[in-house]
């Protein structure tokens, strides 16, 4: 049986689950919305491992899973829920209720940690630990394996920006230090944008800037099972996507074509993914006007529809078959 941990609504998971259904592979899909109840922790005499039996309720039905029956595990997104069913001791025992529920919470969290540990030992694709990959960590390791990265600076001072520009970075962009955020209530997203130095104050909040690269095209690459599935995005043909390809233009979408990476770049990227201990992930790169390959970032749980769909790569089938 395959266990999939993903968001309740996640389109990539839906597409791969479609293939699992065709292949008649049994699976369960869970998310943070599923409140887990731990029924039993025991030693499996056959494998000499400690396994867990847990359950959750969905649509009025109690579903029970024994980790010994999990043949493979796919961490896509989400987390194991830390919620638990509190005990109600009545209005006259609030202090006792708080103490006992606090104790129950600590016990529950300890078992959540162990369940993550058990799942991590299964034949798996990705892990929640992959979320801990830091952008600057991947940039640092990219340099170590011989990849080029954009000139980068994080600062709070305009004087540092001016020195950065004088060092040969005549045109600069700003982008989030971590992952882009959004205000859900207002649908506000942060895109990579050009820095207008005359509008920058002498002091500002901690910000990341990079040299703006004169791009020939962008590369969206999905890494899976030691192979690379790449697409070239002609983002330079559209003013809206010139700086940030994520600033989609639905009325005039970018042309996307399959792309074969040079063996030298593949080898360096493979070394990078090994250092990051990643079996799969979405990689962003740029090819500049001088045909240099420049690494931007790797997202361990990034979307890959923009690679699979326009380039006709059978990624949904391949992942389902792997599971």
Image (cartoon, grey):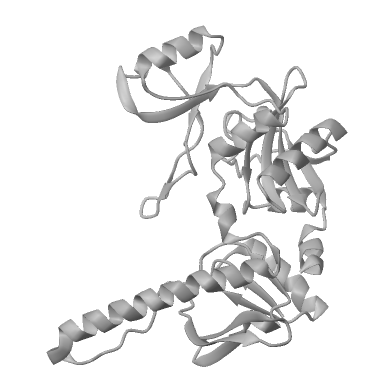
The image quadrant of residue 65 is: bottom right
Q: Is residue 53 above or below residue 71?
A: below
Residue 50 left/right relative to 173: right
Q: Position of residue 250 (x, y in %)?
A: 61, 45
Q: Seen from this angle, which residue lies furthest left?
A: 92
Which residue is pictured at 48% across the width and 81% down the height? 36
Which residue is pictured at 56% across the width and 9% down the height? 168
Which residue is pictured at 26% across the width and 90% down the height? 88
The image quadrant of residue 200 is: top left
Residue 91 left/right relative to 128: left
Q: Position of residue 189 (x, y in %)?
A: 45, 44
Say if residue 31 shows up in the picture.
no
Q: Position of residue 43 (x, y in %)?
A: 62, 85
Q: Quadrant of the N terminus?
A: bottom right
> Front-most of 106 and 69?
106
Q: Is residue 238 above or below residue 220?
A: above
Q: Is residue 1 above or below residue 78?
A: below
Q: Position of residue 4 (x, y in %)?
A: 64, 71
Q: Is residue 152 above or below residue 191?
A: above
Residue 260 left/right relative to 8: right
Q: How many marks?
A: 0
Say if residue 24 shows up in the picture.
yes
Q: Quadrant of the C terminus?
A: bottom right
Q: Seen from this angle, which residue lies furthest top?
A: 166
Which residue is pictured at 83% across the width and 36% down the height? 261
């Amino acid at each position: 049986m395959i266990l999939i941990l993903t968001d309740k609504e996640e389109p990539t998971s839906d597409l791969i689950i479609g293939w699992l259904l065709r292949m008649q592979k049994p699976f369960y899909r869970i998310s943070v919305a599923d409140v887990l109840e731990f029924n039993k922790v025991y030693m499996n005499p056959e494998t000499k491992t400690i396994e867990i039996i847990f359950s959750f309720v969905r649509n009025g039905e109690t579903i029970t899973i024994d980790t010994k029956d999990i043949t493979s595990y796919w961490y896509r997104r989400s987390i194991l829920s830390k919620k638990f069913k509190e005990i109600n001791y009545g209005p006259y025992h609030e202090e006792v209720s708080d103490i006992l529920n606090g104790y129950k919470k600590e016990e529950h969290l300890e078992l959540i940690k162990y369940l993550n540990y058990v799942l991590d030992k299964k034949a798996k694709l990705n892990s929640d630990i992959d979320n801990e990959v830091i952008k600057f960590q991947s940039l640092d390791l990219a340099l170590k394996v011989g990849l080029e990265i954009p000139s980068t600076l994080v600062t709070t001072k305009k004087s540092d920006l001016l020195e950065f520009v004088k060092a040969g970075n005549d045109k600069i962009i700003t982008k989030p230090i971590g992952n882009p955020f959004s205000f859900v209530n207002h649908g506000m997203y942060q895109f990579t944008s050009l820095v207008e130095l005359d509008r920058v104050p002498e002091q500002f909040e901690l910000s990341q800037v990079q040299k703006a690269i004169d791009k020939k095209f962008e590369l969206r690459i999905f890494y899976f099972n030691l192979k690379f599935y790449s697409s070239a995005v002609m983002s330079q043909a559209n003013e809206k996507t010139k700086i940030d390809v994520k600033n989609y233009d639905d009325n005039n979408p970018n042309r996307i074509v399959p792309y074969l990476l040079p063996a030298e770049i593949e080898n360096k990227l493979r070394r990078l993914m090994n250092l990051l201990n990643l079996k799969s992930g979405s990689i962003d790169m740029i090819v500049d006007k001088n045909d240099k390959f420049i690494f931007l970032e790797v997202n361990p749980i990034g979307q890959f529809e923009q690679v699979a769909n326009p380039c006709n790569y059978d990624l949904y089938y391949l992942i389902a078959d792997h599971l």
